[in-house]
Image (cartoon, coloured by chain):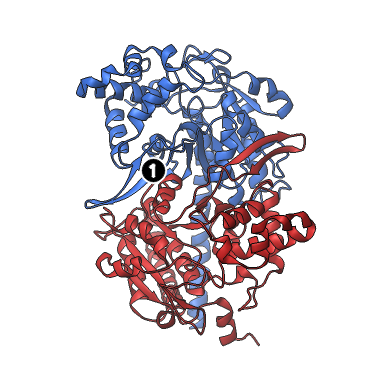
Chain colours: A red, B blue
Amino acid sequence: MTAHLTSQAKLRVPLLSALMAVSIVAAAASSRTADPLASWNDAPPKKAIVAFVEKVTRPDSPDFVPPAERIAVFDNDGTLWPENPVPFQLAYALDTVRQMAAEKPQLREDPMVQAALAGDFATLLEGPHHDGLLRVMALTHSGMTTEEFPARVEKWLATARHPRFDKPYDQLGYQPMQEVLSYLRANGFKTFIVSGGGADFMRVWSERVYGIPPEQIVGSNARTKYELRSSGPVLIKTTDYLFINDKEGKPVGIHEFIGRRPIACFGNSDGDKAMLEYTTIQNPRPSLGMIIHHTDARREYAYDAKPKSSGKLVEALEDAPKRGWVLVDMKQDWEVVFPFEKRQEHPVR
Amino acid sequence: MTAHLTSQAKLRVPLLSALMAVSIVAAAASSRTADPLASWNDAPPKKAIVAFVEKVTRPDSPDFVPPAERIAVFDNDGTLWPENPVPFQLAYALDTVRQMAAEKPQLREDPMVQAALAGDFATLLEGPHHDGLLRVMALTHSGMTTEEFPARVEKWLATARHPRFDKPYDQLGYQPMQEVLSYLRANGFKTFIVSGGGADFMRVWSERVYGIPPEQIVGSNARTKYELRSSGPVLIKTTDYLFINDKEGKPVGIHEFIGRRPIACFGNSDGDKAMLEYTTIQNPRPSLGMIIHHTDARREYAYDAKPKSSGKLVEALEDAPKRGWVLVDMKQDWEVVFPFEKRQEHPVR
């Protein structure tokens, strides 16, 4: 019996070795062909991402971080997809006000509705609390159930097109950032959106567009109200206890929803400065902070201190060198910006 | 060359078959011995859990639920661990007030601190907003950073003992519920705590005790305040925007933090009624609602309408038959309550 087993064992070793060798060759071949960050040019930002991921995931690395603590946070507007000519959620709000005013003409008596219909942003943004904008957001984002709201957003997404790129908004996720999301997840990271946008708005499409489930969305939000109706339980969206998940609110939102410090943070404006600080300054774990700098007027947009309708990038840009935050120059560092560019370059025949 | 490969292939087949046969036998043996719900008696609640899990996970089942939507929510106090003689977080608050009063005697001038030191719950709970209790919670749960607070809780946990069971509090997770958590996760569920307890308090030990990470804790919370100090960024715990995640607040918290309806919900008091409703009534997905009924005065406690110091169980008990919520009779349905009972029954010699 022992002899028999031994002879089997002897046979097995070279066979398994051969099988393993084949697997290793296959894996090496596939890793040669499948660069996980293929849309990034071979420049410092790409190298910084790969070096960071390798450092925190190699079990023998002094900088190894256990998978449970591999939290990566991403701003959305301007970081994962464009924020011009207006942030997409604002486009939704303006389109919806237009539709509501057509259905209920008495709404046109509201001066803020008039301003929205006229595209008069100066009036909407007047005052320290931007009352006009808040009125438009309240009209379009509250008063309905948490099941009605996503149905409306889906309906809008199905027909609305970006005015410049003439694509559905949800097809405009930046290709290089999609690759970062996938690459981090393949390396045991949990990816979260931490955005000033509305959580309920983002949750409608975040799983489909970025592979990020609703429970990993940290965004602006307001309290809902529970009711048990004869048709079943509902939650009504209100504007009570409005929380704006921006600037100093971002680390606050991160703590409230995630409960631990991220080790990687991607942003593009001063609205992300506080979460970049929270991620990278005196973090007992190694960390990576990255700023997407919009430098490409031809393929996307070029702006920082003077954005069209979103937060400016001045202070975070100034702090980047002393904080060690890596700047991504979209024009220099991204081989393609949008997925549809990629398809045009390699057409399927 | 072809002949050589073929002869290798011929050799490989019986060897691999033999290896596979060994694995299958081993797996069958282990599934016979390892009942995932071993601490549950073979009664209706155990059968209901297993039937539900099989129904939603079998790919050919008409009730199949994709893994991303397998959200299970658990109340904590009285559902995953005891809530007597007082909820453990209250024990922490009272012990901490005692220690603070010893360090800063002027605190004793506060009548609510006096009531806490005297164990005078009637005074602490007086008034519609339980001002005394809130004062004690504010004293012990705010004013420090989000790094100092967990350090204090850890220190307390390391020495505090439950007055009746004489064990560290974090060793009192109910063994049968630990098995439910593991069983659900092994079947692709994401498990969340949805508790009236403080999120920051639970996050200190939830991963170690229940295998539930901080980002899957939905609890009562208040806003933190971000500061960039010379020592690094901090978040200061405040009592602003206090949100009590109980009763109608539970579905509200579930929507805010998770963003989709759970398909399984476990609770033990009327504080869980709204989330049981939200999980089970008119849910387009199949669902399971379960109520832990404290019926075992010998091994744990027996109470429902008249709890010692926690929420009562009256309305949810009344609604259970018409809602199809499964009642767990702790005395009848649980073979053991605590992990340490199990060790006593099968001592290692």
Give the structural element (helix, strand or loop) at label 1.
Answer: strand
The answer to which image quadrant residue A28 occupies is: bottom left
Please rate how many residues cluster around mark 1, counting C-alpha atoms within 10 Å: few if below 14, some from 14 to 19, many from 20. Answer: many
Toward which corner of the image does residue A97 lie, by quadrant?
bottom right
Q: State the residue position of label 1.
A: B224
Q: Identify whether B71 is placed above or below B12.
A: above
Q: Callout 1, which amino acid?
A: Thr
Q: Nearer the viewer, residue A10 or A310?
A: A310
Left or right relative to B148: residue B278: right
Q: Is residue A195 above or below residue B124?
A: below
Instruction: Indicate the position of residue A324 as horizontal and vertical percent values.
Output: 28, 67
Return the residue nearer the eye: B69 or A120.
A120
Q: Quadrant of residue A319?
A: bottom left
**Viewport quadrant of the C terminus of chain B:** top left
Along the line of sight, the residue nearer the viewer: A323 or B88: A323
Depth check: give the residue in front, A243 or B251. A243
Residue occupying the point 42% across, 43% down = B214
> Which residue occupies 47% across, 11% down?
B298
Q: Position of residue B308 (x, y in %)?
A: 48, 14
Q: Which chain hosts label 1?
A: B
Q: Is residue A62 visible to the viewer in this orientation of the structure? A: yes
Q: Position of residue A304 (x, y in %)?
A: 42, 73
